[in-house]
Image (tube, helix red, strand yellow):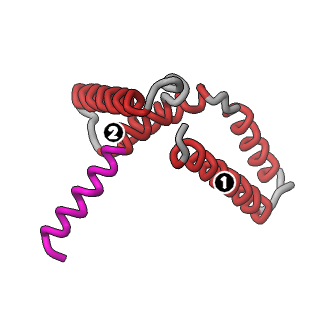
Amino acid sequence: MSMTLLIGIQFIGILAAYTILTVLLPAIVLKEKLKGRSMPERFLFSCLAGNFYLMNLVFGLQLLHISNRFTLIAGTIIPGVILWIRWNHIPVKHYISQFFHQLKKYDERKLGWRTILLDIRRILSGVCQKAAVFFRKYVMEKP
């Protein structure tokens, strides 16, 4: 592989990651706030909010001397997930209590590995189906 091709592939990867972080994530998180706006207004506000957040995140992490790949990824994804959970009223406490109830059953030898793996598969398939519906509804179709 030539260096020109490698640099081109890396540039495309960086551009895709930057676009996702500055346009797509703010658009998903701020979906309800930007509901009545036109497409150019939503795009510009998403770019502005995403760039502003990333600049302040990098500045704060550099100020604390803890800036690396993992803190940047965590600082980008975790607040978005928390806001999305709060705005969509997802019952996280219920899911956590269910998880610990399953662990207690496994600890008491009332559940086996097969049952746990089937439950995990069922949960993951449901999450994948919901993600596909969300992607088709809010990304592929015009909101």
Residue drawn at point x = 55 percent, y = 32 percent? 84
Q: Position of residue 117 (x, y in %)?
A: 72, 61
Prevailing secondary structure class for the magenta stretch in the rendered image: helix
Task: Decide which of 33, 106 is in the foreground and name it.
Answer: 33
The amino acid type of the residue labelled 1 equals Gln
Residue at image mark 1: 129
Residue at the spot 34% in from the left edge and 30% down from the top edge: 44
Name which residue lies at 53% across and 28% down.
83
Crowd around label 2: few <14 · some 14–19 · many ≥20 (10 Å): some
Amino acid on which the number 2 mark rests in the picture:
Leu
Left or right: where does residue 8 sit relative to residue 29? left
Residue highlighted by disc 2: 72
Q: Nearer the viewer, residue 62 or 46?
A: 46
Q: Does any portion of residue 20 appear in the rendered image?
A: yes
Residue range corresponding to the magenta coloring: 1-19
Q: What number of labels is visible?
A: 2
- Residue 22 point in image, percent of width and height: 34, 37
In which image quadrant can residue 87 be found?
top right
Q: Residue at x 63, y 30 (%)?
A: 88
Relative to 107, is 68 above or below? above
Q: Residue furthest bottom?
A: 1
Secondary element under disc 1, as helix, strand or loop, is helix
> Based on the displayed image, in which of its 4 quarters is residue 129 positioned?
bottom right
